[in-house]
Amino acid sequence: MAKIIGVSGAHGTGKTTVLNAIEQTEIGNVTIDAFSVSRHVQNDYGVPLAEIVANPVEVPAFQDKIVQTMVDRVGSLRKWYKSQDAFMFVDRSPVDTYAYAKIWLQGNQGYADWLTQYETKCANALRAYDLIILVPPREFEFVAESKRASKETQIAHHNECVEFLNTHGINVYTVESLD
């Protein structure tokens, strides 16, 4: 049966670098699912991410749609590869969506109940993954780009991910180096 492995971390931490390195290895039947659920949902939404983040009332529906799409995608991958002894690596996992939602809604007390429910939804969704590879913020010079999280957001995202994964006992491997 296929193993589903989510590669998680903030924008700009090196997830694509890790996925590219895995694709170049010869560890057996490896498939990289390059489909970006977050970008797909954002494109369907038709609203720039900055506008969603700036308007907290938009965040719950947007994040719910992302995690549901992730669940559907993982279910499809399991079905497509059910008879294969394969490793399926996917870009991001529900731990990312939870971490970003918590950061974006920080200080907005009106969303505490939703965040609690969303945490449970994301924890349940993560049970479909066999492993999460967490890519922490890089130790080398940060290069800001328009679609990348700031260094501060990278650190906050990583800390939220670590806390979430530890709290829910999710199987995780943290990348020590991109070398």
Image (cartoon, rainbow, N blue to C red):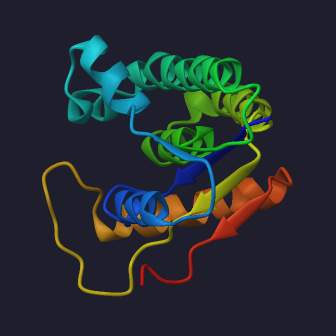
Q: Nearer the viewer, residue 30 or 94?
A: 30
- Residue 14: % across, % down: 37, 66
Q: Residue at x 14, y 59 (%)?
A: 145
Q: Nearer the viewer, residue 52 or 178?
A: 178
Q: Quadrant of residue 73?
A: top right
Position of 104 relative to 40 (above/below): below
Position of 101 relative to 7 (above/below): above
Q: Quadrant of residue 57?
A: top left
- Residue 27: % across, % down: 62, 63
- Whether residue 142 sits left or right of residue 176 in the image: it is left
Q: Residue at x 30, y 23 (%)?
A: 42
Q: Nearer the viewer, residue 58 or 78?
A: 78
Q: Residue at x 39, y 31 (%)?
A: 35
Q: Nearer the viewer, residue 164 or 20?
A: 20
- Residue 31: % across, % down: 52, 43
Picture quarter with the C terminus? bottom left
Q: Residue at x 66, y 27 (%)?
A: 81
- Whether residue 109 sits left or right of residue 120 in the image: it is left
Picture quarter with the N terminus? top right
- Whether residue 142 sits left or right of residue 177 in the image: it is left
